[in-house]
Every structure is written in structure tokens, then in C-alpha cells.
Image (cartoon, helix red, strand yellow):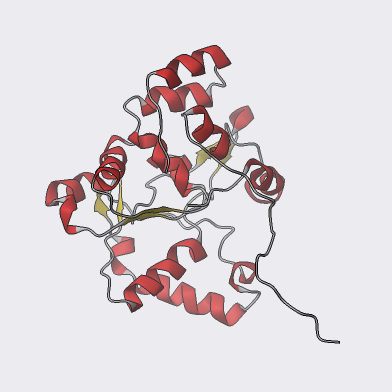
Amino acid sequence: MTIFSTAEEQQREPLEIGGKVLFYPDFALRTAGGDVSVVEPWKSYVPFKIAS
Amino acid sequence: MLVSSGRGLPLKDGKLYAGAGYYLNELTVPVRALMKEGYEITFANPKGNTPQLDVNSATPDFFGGDEAKLQDYLKFRDSLTELKNPTRISDVIASGLDQYDAVFVPGGHGPMIDLLDDPDAGTVMRHFHETSKPTAVLCHGPISLLSALPNSKEVVAALAAAMPPELTQRLKAGSILDIR
């Protein structure tokens, strides 16, 4: 499963929702005992070549 | 597929995000793919009301910058009559959860309004976990897993009130969420 990370939410808050959420989803799941891993945002794992 | 019944996500400082709902791409892309594979989709939410589209999700940005693709998926969304008239989650439970192959919760901020501590959503989540059937949650969808806690309303209230860590710890001690 994937989850919207705190870093992503904080990026979108001013642009999209016009305020700050009461709590962040990954923090909430951690607080409830969940094992949540956050990896680098926007990182592509698809190899590609740039044509010269 | 579980979606929100909510209208407006409470924010800090008494603000409200009125545009909260499901993200168009997160709902329609998987639904179209599943339907193409022959699956029948049941849309369900707590109140049985029409779920709200997140106002920020109907843009070409989320469809590869392709306006035509956005329009195609909007048209597809409009064809989903069951999405306009979803079943109450309680009715889905009453009809028997064993008939379903999987549960999916798309994102958008909708699940943060009501699915996170909805008792019926919790029943659904526990059923699919206990029967080892797929549970797929995306973006803000995972917050709905909190509903599986026996004291989800207390936990969510503590989170919303920014309770002191020690109180949160006490709540946590009585309800461990096991995500595998």
C-alpha cells in the first residue's frame, strides 16, 4: 500500500487545501502502531536513456 | 470500494477544506482496470450519499497533462451510476462480505473526514484482514485502516486534539494496528 507522506501533504497544503490538516496520515498510522516506511518522494524506479 | 460521505475536511484554526473528496484518477483508473478484467464494483460509504469529487483532482496534471484523457475519465466517472447512488457500508455488511473479492479505498482527503473512525468501515477492514483477502489503500486511503481499531474514535479524537504524547501512548497501548 502507499500513503500520502507528511512531506507531500505539507507541500500541497497551501496549494490545494488552504490550511493545515489536523494531523498527518503517516503520523496517525505510526501513532496507532503501524509500521510506516517513507521513501524519497517523486523517485522513479524506471530505468531510461536520454537519446543523444 | 469504500468512499467518503463527508462534506468538508476540518483543518487547524477552524478552517474547512470544502473541496475534499475522492481524487478522480485514484478512483477511476483502478475502477476502469478492474471492470475491464470483469470485476463488478460495489461503491459504499457510511451514509449512502453521493461522494464528492475533490475539486483539485479534475485537472489534466493528474492525467499526464492530457486534457482529452481527463475528459475521457470524467465521462467514465459519470457513467458509474452506482457511484452516484452508493450502498451504505452497513448494508454491504448485512448482505454478506464473503461475496466480495477485495476492498479498495482511493485517496483524496475524503477518507480523513469519516472513514478513519467509521465503525462499519472498521468491520469491513477487519473482515478482509481476517479472511486474508486483498486490502488496497492509496494515498489518503490508508487512514481508513484506523477504523479497524477497537477504539478508533478515541484515537482519532486524540490525534485531532493534538493530545500529549503520553495520552496517545496510553491509547496506543490498548489498540495496536498491525499493518503487513
Q: Residue furthest bottom?
A: A52
Q: Quadrant of the C terminus of chain B?
A: top left
Figure disc tally: 0
Residue B4 higher or lower than A22, as above or below: below
Residue B171 higher or lower than B131, as above or below: above
Residue nearest the viewer, comparing B76 with B38? B38
In this image, B78 relative to B162: left or right?
left
In the rendering, at what x and y percent does residue B116 appear?
41, 38
Which residue sits at x=55%, y=79%? Answer: B69
Is residue B116 among the parts visible in the rendering?
no
In the rendering, at what x and y percent does residue A48 appear?
72, 76
Residue nearest the viewer, comparing A17 with A49? A49
Q: Quadrant of residue B173?
A: top left
In the rendering, at what x and y percent does residue B149 appear?
35, 30
Q: Residue furthest left?
A: B95
Which residue sits at x=27%, y=48%? Answer: B128
Is residue B14 among the parts visible in the rendering?
yes
In this image, B79 relative to A40: left or right?
left
Q: Quadrant of the N terminus of chain B?
A: bottom left
In the rendering, at what x and y percent does residue B111 appear?
44, 45
Which residue sits at x=38%, y=26%? Answer: B153
Which residue sits at x=47%, y=73%? Answer: B74
Residue B25 higher or lower than B69, as above or below: above
In this image, B45 relative to A13: left or right?
left
